[in-house]
Amino acid sequence: MIQAIGLTSTPRKELPPAVDDVSFEARPGRVTALLGAPGAGKTTTLRLMLELQRGRGITYFRGRPLHRIAHPSREAGVLLSEVPGHPARTIRGQLGMVCAAVGVPIRRVDEVIEVVGLVSLCDERLGTLSRGMDRRLGLACALLSDPHALVLDDPAGGLSAAEGRWLHEVLRAHAARGGTVLFSTDDPKEAARTADRVITLEGGRLVADQEAADFARTRLRPRVAVRSPHAARLGALLAKEARAAQRSVEVVREDGNRLSVYGSTCADIGETAFRHGILVHQLADETGDMGPYATLPAEGLASATVVASALLTSASATSTLTDDALTDDAPTQDAPATDEPATAVAATGARTPDEPGPTAESRTRAAASPGARDLPQLPPPIAVRQAPSPLRPLRYELRRATGVGTGYLTSITVLVSSALLSVLLARIGHTPQPRLLAAWPRDCPLPPAALGAGLLGALAFGEEFRHPALAADRGTVPRRLGLLAAKLLVASVTALALAVLTVGCDLEMLYLVYGRDLAGVPADWLSLSASWIGLTVGCAWAGVLAAGIFRSTTAGLAAVLAVPVVVVPLVQKTLTGPSVRKAAGFSERLRELLLMQWPFGGARYIAAGARLVAQPVGSALMLSLTALLCAYLLTTLRSRVR
């Protein structure tokens, strides 16, 4: 069961709150529709329920708010907008990422794909999906963790009639298994046709909470749609005959040559048109809406309707119509605005005061007054719930990195450009062999392999913010240490593989083109290898951290380039300055500090590492990584405090 109590959004400057004191229930085993015109507050209500927006109130999902549930995705499946996945990722790849994020086995993907009817399209890319297929994918993501409740924002919007019927059949099947379904819509006919209970919003306030049968009886009524080039004359004749026959007939003139006739039949209207020789282009039974949020006809009529002939009845017929029709409609349309939410909430059985709740503005003024202690307390504030971290971050990051071809294309580009550049540098000459193997000209700030590793690291977080899969409803990605560790580990392995492959390809190309003269292994290959691996891995880490801080791939790559262009000259200027003390005998003092012999020649490796860090590029890279890591941790702590 979903219980929403006192949902009120934060007012925007001088404007009233978009949602004001909305309370209702959505019971298990039933489909509940949240009905309202565009701008009535449906989406804001759902976001307040899911703790995605600040405000006041509380929503219980089976007795607990979402921030008290360990795994919210297993309690509520959410579909608020289109699936913002990477356009080049396949349907199966996207669902596999979500599986790792919510902690369900990968076999669940095949089960959900079969339920939503995407078996034949599982290898299609997201950028090629139609609106209907995208909605099916969004529903699959919502069903992936087998949640108890489904919360959907206009799920049938933009779908064809057949796709809409299929969608509502899936929702009905979920409710039949004991689940709770809550969806929003602006179509009264859809709400009456597919839901068990209809909750109506108007202007951010709850105006009705009815069973679907009561809603259809009190808010909808049949009509006859007539289209004729002589609509005005036909309307006058229908009104005249209704007055003569003492019948309750209402004729409403629409835009163009269209009439909406209430209280008559197609047969009576057709006979009248035939007797008077009036040409009729359309004559059909329809269901019209009586509420202020009525949707326009399918033909796209935009302006308000004009009453061509008022209700023409005798006094007795008028009283009969008032007693029979308007009495049932009074609680939902004619009741004062302050009484409507209280009446609707009382019908749901929620625990609310007997008195109608005050508006947000009046409650704020009352709380500031001296007698505020005598008034009922405000609903609890809604704090924005933090985006969930993936339950299996390493598996999630591996599927993210291998699910699109960007990483493969970048790696191939790096290998080809490095091989060609090394051959060109060898032809020109005056380049040491270590730089030939790394394809690193003296005038370039970084070799292609380091730039490629930095770009792949920046994409690790940059794509998350551009195509958020972890927190699609927030448009962001959680800054959690587990996710950061997974991204750094994957970036390290990728950079290491790229560094080794680059040297291997360059060595092979130099051997094929120039023979064995340039294909030899340097004598100090161990220290050179450590420097080379440290450079590529450090660039990858700098890209990951900078993209996570600045939320952009471009910023991550700019941070990688800033190390040799900006930081290295500053470090060189510092190291070449006058120095009074030197660090001679560093390894011996380390050995004395630990009072033990380093195993396997560890002192030599420590000294080599210290020499690497003492170099300008190594010092600049270490300094940059330390600053970026501190900034990332600071932003993470700040978001948690907020």
Image: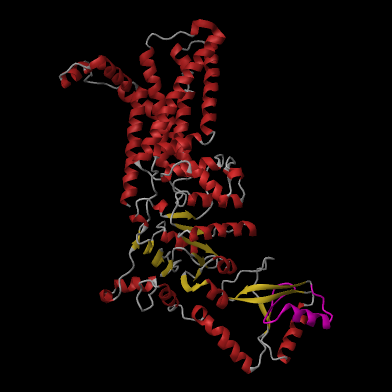
Query: How far across and down, in percent of the image, does residue 227 sit?
Result: 75, 73
Residue in the picture at 35% in, 15% down: 527
* The N terminus: image quadrant: bottom left
Q: Is 306 rendered above or below residue 70? A: below
Q: Is 507 rendered above or below residue 458? A: above
Query: How far across and down, in percent of the image, does residue 88 sit?
Result: 56, 39
Q: Is 597 rendered above or below residue 490? A: above
Q: Does 263 appear in magenta?
A: yes
Q: Is residue 570 visible from the viewing direction of this image? A: no
Q: Residue furthest front?
A: 177
Residue in the picture at 58% in, 40% down: 123
Q: Is residue 415 visible from the viewing direction of this image? A: yes
Residue in the picture at 43% in, 26% down: 495
Q: Does 39 appear in magenta?
A: no
Q: Quadrant of residue 485?
A: top left
User: Which residues, given as a range, are shown in magenta?
Assistant: 252-280
User: In this rendering, would 577 be left or right of 456?
Assistant: left
Q: Nearer the viewer, residue 287 or 364?
A: 287
Query: How far across and down, in percent of the image, does residue 426 sit?
Result: 52, 11
User: In this rendering, would 90 be left or right of 633?
Assistant: right
